[in-house]
Image (spheres, helix red, strand yellow):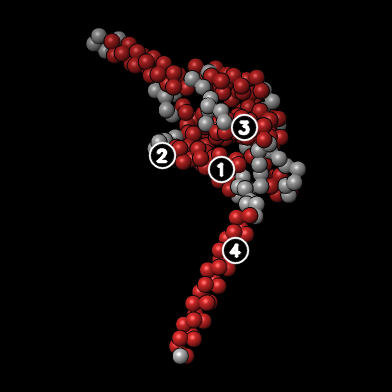
């Protein structure tokens, strides 16, 4: 009899636990869920696409840089109009478009109003470093071409921008130097045809090599 009573109590207790968990789950579903940072989600989706396509190189490294930057500052968000430009465009990957926006507009692309001083400082510091990030990205692209001067030949604005940056860097902040929005836009617009540039440089490099071989010693 005692064992029967204990069994009934156990079954009652188990039923109560199950009922309570169901009620709790239903209440949690009714509560508004806290949304993640859309920019980090966007960069994460890009990372997944790069991983599935087994893509490495400049875009992958740029993506990883931004993910690491914003993982430590989750409250730094893009303004809605810039988020759409960054994540819904087909002209470039989100990471490249984000770099372009930072170079053109600096920290103004972020919602900084409610951030603490530390996170505001992180956003501004990222804008200050954008030129160096850009040059590292270009170096990665250049490494994918057959000619060490390929990008400078096909996009002369890169050399002009680089020389101006080096000349002014010691006297001004990076973002002050990045006021040449026209040149920045020209560079990025020409980079849309990067695949074509690579093929052209490969053909030209091969032609140059054949020319050297035909005019070499003993020819």
Q: Are marks 3 and 2 in contact (CB under 8 Å)?
A: no
Q: Are marks 1 and 4 in contact (CB under 8 Å)?
A: no
- Vertical placement of residue 146 versus 173, above or below: above
Task: Confirm whether residue 65 shows in the render.
Answer: no
Tell which circle, 2 or 1, labels the residue nearer the N-terminal end: 1
Residue at the disc numbered 4 = 24
Q: Nearer the viewer, mark 4 or mark 2?
A: 4
Residue 206 pos. (x, y %): 34, 16
Residue 90 pos. (x, y %): 53, 26
Asked whether 49 or 186 is in front, the reply is: 49
Provide the secondary structure element on which disc 2 rests: helix
Quarter assignment of residue 101: top right
Task: Confirm whether residue 161 shows in the render.
Answer: yes
Furthest toward the front, the residue is 1
Q: Are marks 1 and 3 in contact (CB under 8 Å)?
A: no
Q: So how many labels did they put on this image?
A: 4
Q: Which mark is residue 41?
A: 1
Determine the residue positioned at 51% across, 74% down.
14
**Distance between the Cα atoms at labels 3 and 2?**
23 Å
Asked whether 45 or 120 is in front, the reply is: 45
Residue at the disc numbered 2 = 52
Structural crowding at the residue carrying mark 4, measured as other residues with C-alpha within 10 Å and reported as few (<14), some (14–19) or many (≥20): few
Tell which circle, 3 or 4, labels the residue nearer the N-terminal end: 4
Provide the secondary structure element on which disc 1 rests: helix
Quarter assignment of residue 69: top right
Tell which circle, 4 or 2, labels the residue nearer the N-terminal end: 4
């Amino acid at each position: 009899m005692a064992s029967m009573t204990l069994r009934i109590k156990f079954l009652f207790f188990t039923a109560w636990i199950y009922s309570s968990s169901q009620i709790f789950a239903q209440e949690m579903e009714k509560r508004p869920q806290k949304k993640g940072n859309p920019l980090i989600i966007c960069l994460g989706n890009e990372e997944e696409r790069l991983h599935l396509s087994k893509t490495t190189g400049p875009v992958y490294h740029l993506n990883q840089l931004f993910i690491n930057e914003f993982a430590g500052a989750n409250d730094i968000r893009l303004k809605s109009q810039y988020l759409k430009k960054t994540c819904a465009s087909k002209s470039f990957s989100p990471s490249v478009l984000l770099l372009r926006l930072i170079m053109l507009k600096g920290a103004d692309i972020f919602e900084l109003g409610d951030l603490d001083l530390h996170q505001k400082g992180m956003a501004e510091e990222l804008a200050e470093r954008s030129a160096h990030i850009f040059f590292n990205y270009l170096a990665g692209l250049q490494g994918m071409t057959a000619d060490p001067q390929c990008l400078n030949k096909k996009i002369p604005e890169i050399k002009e921008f680089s020389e101006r940056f080096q000349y002014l860097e010691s006297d001004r902040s990076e973002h002050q130097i990045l006021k040449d929005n026209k040149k920045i836009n020209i560079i990025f617009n020409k980079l849309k045809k990067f695949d074509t540039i690579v093929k052209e440089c490969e053909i030209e490099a091969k032609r140059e090599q054949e020319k050297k071989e035909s005019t070499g010693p003993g020819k």
